């Protein structure tokens, strides 16, 4: 498909809550997203053995669709240091959304990037 770069923004429950209305532009590679908004709680944290994730939603930009897709699912259960390591090793960027009440948005952005900017 020709054209681009395409502006990407955060929607759903985080639209309007973040300090990043347009978070990235995509001109090559692939984008994937994962979370509970559409399918509900369906991802297991296998290390903790529970059907609960550390993050509410995640998005990844990676060189291939397969890597981006795998990263978004894995990212939901990873700690910040693990997110940074995975992003660095796979030449990707990962964006995660924290669970926090809306009043906290004044003090801490609910979104956090990992990987090279």
Image (tube, grey):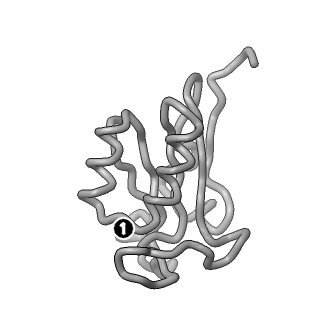
Question: For this rendering, which residue is in front, 16 or 98?
Answer: 98
Residue occupying image coordinates x 28% and y 57%: 82
> Circle 1 — which element?
loop
Residue occupying image coordinates x 43% and y 48%: 94
- Locate the C terminus and report the quarter of the image it occupies: top left
> Residue 2's spot in the image, x, y percent?
74, 15
* Mark 1 neighbour density, 10 Å: few (under 14) some (14–19) many (20 or more): few
Position of 86 with respect to 42 (left or right) is left
- Locate the N terminus and report the quarter of the image it occupies: top right
> Residue 61's spot in the image, x, y percent?
51, 39
Residue occupying image coordinates x 56% and y 72%: 43
The single residue placed furthest to the top in the displayed view is 2
How many marks on residues?
1
In the displayed structure, 24 sits above or below 50; it is: above
Question: For this rendering, which residue is in front, 13 or 68?
Answer: 68
The quadrant holding residue 45 is bottom left
> Residue 32's spot in the image, x, y percent?
60, 46
Position of 11 with respect to 100 (left or right) is right
Question: For this rendering, which residue is in front, 9 or 28?
Answer: 28
> Residue 91's spot in the image, x, y percent?
37, 33
Which residue was labeled with disc 1?
108
């Amino acid at each position: 498909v020709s054209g681009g770069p395409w502006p990407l923004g955060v929607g759903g429950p985080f639209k309007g809550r973040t300090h990043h209305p347009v978070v990235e532009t995509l001109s090559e590679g692939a984008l994937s997203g994962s979370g509970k908004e559409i399918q509900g709680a369906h991802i297991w944290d296998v290390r903790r053995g529970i059907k609960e994730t550390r993050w509410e939603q995640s998005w990844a930009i990676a060189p291939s669709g397969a890597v981006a897709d795998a990263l978004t699912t894995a990212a939901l259960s990873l700690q910040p240091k693990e997110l940074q390591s995975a992003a660095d090793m796979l030449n990707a960027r990962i964006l995660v959304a924290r669970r926090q009440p809306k009043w906290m948005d004044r003090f801490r952005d609910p979104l956090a990037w990992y990987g090279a900017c």
